[in-house]
Amino acid sequence: MKPYLRSIKAKWTLQDYPDNTTYEAGYLISKNAGWRSIRPVIDTKKCSGCLQCYLHCPDGVISKRDGAVAIDYDFCKGCGICKRICKLKAIEMEAESK
Amino acid sequence: MSREFLSGNEAFAYGIRLAAPQVISAYPITPQTIVVERLSEMVEDKSLKSEFIHVESEHSALSCAIGASATGVRTFTATSSQGLLYMAECLVYASGGRYPIVMMNANRSTALPWNIYGDQRDSLSLLDCGWIQAYAKDAQESLDLAILSYYIAEHPKVSTPFMVNLDGFHLTHTYEMVEVPESELVKNFLSDYNTDNKIDFENPKNIAFSAGPEHNFAFKYKEHIGILNAKEIISEAEQKFAPLFGREYSGLVEAYRCDDAEYILITLGSIFGLCSDVADELRNEGVKTGVLRLRYMRPFPNKEIADIARNAKAVAVLEKDISFGNEGSVYTNVNSALQKAGLSVPSLNFIGGLGGRDISEEDIREIFNKLSQGKTAVHFIGIEEGAII
């Protein structure tokens, strides 16, 4: 389980913001991946679903969706730890310019 | 009520015992040490039920207070000088997170040259960090501010950390008779801290989150409104305080003989007493003088200063501070208040007391003397060739 983006409003007013920096857990409203230069891509045929990449991802962007391991590119920073940890070599890093 | 012979530090500790924070985290530094020593003794002798946490630095002292406040409890810390500067990173976490921590700061010079004596450059260099800043004039006001500060800081419309400043040595180490109220009275005045801004196991929350360029600005605006709201709540707190405790306070400023004054000396902290004595002497000699004490630097008393200075021939700002390369920061703020009100009264800046140098009665007489000449300039008391236009 991981939090996903919720409630993206076109225009925010002051009333939409909390008065402090405390809010319902797992509430993400801004994408945060703008500086990624390379992205991990999972070869689902090689992937066994062991979830080592999920355990090691420092940004918590890997999860199982519809039975397959998937990456949330709205938050992945492209660090490549998942590629390094994958013993089956099921993850490759691809340039973002592609 | 009892009457006790207390120093400023001790009076503040007595006030904190009455406000009864659940968590105190502190690191000792001259001239603040005695306030936390007394509090640790009170915890030891069980006259204060509080978790007293010894930490390894001031950075940790405030970090610890922030963590405690984020569990929804009342917190206290204290520091001075280099310690305040060391915790500067955490000051903005406390204010941005809207944690109503109360901190006593013993105003002290900053290095180099190394010096432990009193001036106000430590706290005045941090006016922009989002904390309420009050400056006490004596030990009684110090004790009362220890109680009032929690009422104001924890009010839901404010929710802002509160720094109470005591002049190092002049106030922290000087003994005077202080009225110590009964704890029942304080319980009637100060309700328990109650907030949604906390860790909650029943209703899990993100705390101290980040916000990118699109959303960050709104939080900063709200922080600003919170500290501005303190003006109203300071007044509300003092009006409730007066009938219960028998002592009246006058909001953001205290004016002494300013009503018909032609020459007004604006200052802050414990030097107010001596300035008032000199104003009395000059009044006896036929010079219409008054003294205006800034009790609060944030929120800043723009309106109060303008209202009082409106009919003056000239105003002076005496401060133990210099913003190197410009002028005293209090002077900058006062000039802004005058300018916004459309006043063109001449204003003079007097920088004094840096590194704990004494400001004498003669020095204050000389300020009023220069004031009557009404020529805008920045003067450095006791430094030859000091005036800078």
Image (spheres, rainbow, N blue to C red):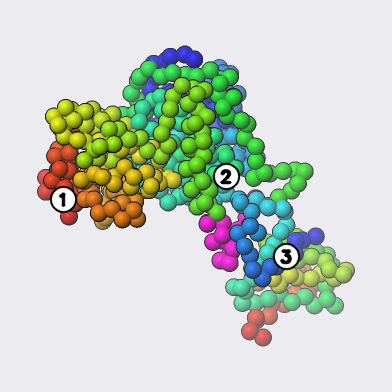
Residue at 74% x, 77% y is A41
Q: Of the numbered discs in the image, which one, if any, rests on residue B375?
A: 1
Residue most extreme to the right: A67
Q: Quadrant of residue B75?
A: top right
Q: Is residue B364 above or below residue B91?
A: above
Q: Tag 1, which chain?
A: B
Which span is picked out in magenta? B207-221
Crowding around mark 3 (Cα neighbors within 10 Å: few <14, some 14 to 19, many 20+) is few
Which residue is at the front of the view, A59 or B194?
B194
The C terminus of chain B: image quadrant: bottom left
Crowding around mark 1 (Cα neighbors within 10 Å: few <14, some 14 to 19, many 20+) is few
Q: Tag 2, which chain?
A: B
Residue B82 pos. (x, y %): 38, 42
Between discs 1 and 2, the one toward the N terminus: 2
Residue B176 pos. (x, y %): 35, 19
Q: Which residue is mark 3?
A: A7
Check if mark 1's residue and mark 2's residue have beta carbons within 8 Å. no
Crowding around mark 2 (Cα neighbors within 10 Å: few <14, some 14 to 19, many 20+) is some
Say what amino acid the circle numbered 3 marks. Answer: Ser
Say what amino acid the circle numbered 2 marks. Answer: Lys
Which residue is at the front of the view, B47 or B276?
B276
Q: Of the numbered discs in the image, which one, if any, rests on residue B157?
A: 2
Residue at 43% x, 14% y is B3
For mark 1, give the secondary structure. Answer: loop
Q: Is residue B213 magenta?
A: yes
Give the number of marks: 3
Say what amino acid the circle numbered 1 marks. Answer: Lys
Residue at 49% x, 31% y is B239
For mark 2, give the secondary structure. Answer: loop
